[in-house]
């Protein structure tokens, strides 16, 4: 899953970016509201973590502009502003959740998973693909109830497909889910991960639509 982090505090930005990357998220980080608007115009994100007190353009202005354009990407406000009026203004402007600093990275990750689950219309925390079960919270994968060890990127790729069963995702779309800005992507990286997943979870789990991309079937 690809996340845009909009945060002007360097220490918080580094901490959140690295923490989410360890949880398997691809994270792009910008430090002001104008840069956030540019990123949102040029890239596709699964979720935005948005501070309110930003240089050049406030987080609230960014959020209002985003919703005015009809963009439905989930937005989690993460800010030091803890007044009830600020919470109300943020949620009424279109935010999906509001988290006050300082916050625990585990709680942040849990809130992100909940928003992504809601966005996908999936109330259950577990994802089932036939004999394979994924737990996004713990990143545990079971095949026929037996645990299977996956690398962080293997899990991220499988989750990207599992979140949209029946949809065909191209190699470029999968790369966007797995890699943030500045991360090098090999020419056959996706194919290598697909091969590894098929070997570990069964050759029939991930289907190749020739010339288009990859999919997991609806159950």
Image (tube, rainbow, N blue to C red):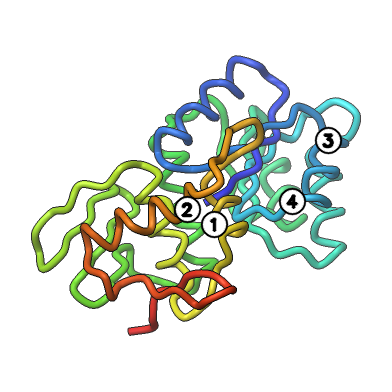
The residue at 49%/27% (across/down) is 18
Of callouts 1 and 4, which one flags the residue occurring earlier in the amino acid sequence?
4
The residue at 83%/53% (across/down) is 64
Residue extending farthest bottom: 219
Q: Disc number at residue 3?
A: none
Mark in front: 4 vs 2 = 2
Mark in front: 3 vs 1 = 1
- Secondary element under disc 3, as helix, strand or loop, is helix
Q: Please report contact status of discs 2 and 3: CB closer than 8 Å, yes or no.
A: no
Q: Disc number at residue 43?
A: 4
State left or right for residue 34 relative to residue 206.
right
Label 2: which residue?
A: 190
Label 3: which residue?
A: 35
State left or right for residue 165 relative to residue 212.
left
Q: Nearer the viewer, residue 30 or 61?
A: 30
Q: Nearer the viewer, residue 55 or 38?
A: 38
Mark 2–mark 1 distance (CA, rounded to whole Å): 7 Å
Q: Tag 3: Cα neighbours inside 10 Å, few (<14), some, or many (≥20)? A: some
Label 1: which residue?
A: 174
Of callouts 3 and 4, which one flags the residue occurring earlier in the amino acid sequence?
3
Mark 1–mark 4 distance (CA, rounded to whole Å): 13 Å
């Amino acid at each position: 899953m690809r996340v845009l982090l909009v945060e002007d505090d360097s220490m918080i930005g580094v901490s959140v970016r690295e923490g989410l990357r360890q949880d398997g998220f691809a994270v792009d980080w910008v430090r002001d509201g104008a840069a956030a608007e540019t990123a949102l115009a040029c890239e596709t994100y699964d979720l935005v973590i948005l501070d309110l007190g930003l240089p050049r353009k406030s987080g609230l202005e960014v959020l209002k502009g985003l919703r005015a354009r009809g963009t439905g990407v989930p937005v989690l406000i993460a800010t030091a502003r803890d007044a009830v009026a600020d919470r109300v203004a943020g949620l009424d402007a279109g935010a999906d959740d509001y988290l006050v600093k300082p916050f625990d990275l585990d709680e942040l990750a849990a809130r992100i998973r909940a928003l992504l689950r809601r966005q996908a219309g999936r109330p259950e925390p577990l994802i089932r693909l036939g004999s394979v079960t994924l737990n996004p919270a713990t990143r545990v994968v079971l095949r026929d109830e037996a645990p299977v060890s996956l690398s962080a990127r293997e899990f991220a790729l499988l989750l990207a497909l599992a979140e949209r069963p029946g949809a065909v995702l191209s190699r470029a779309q999968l790369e966007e889910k797995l890699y943030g800005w500045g991360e090098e992507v090999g020419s056959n990286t996706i194919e290598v991960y697909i091969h590894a997943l098929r070997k570990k979870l069964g050759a029939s789990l991930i289907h190749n639509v020739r010339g288009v991309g990859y999919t997991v079937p609806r159950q």
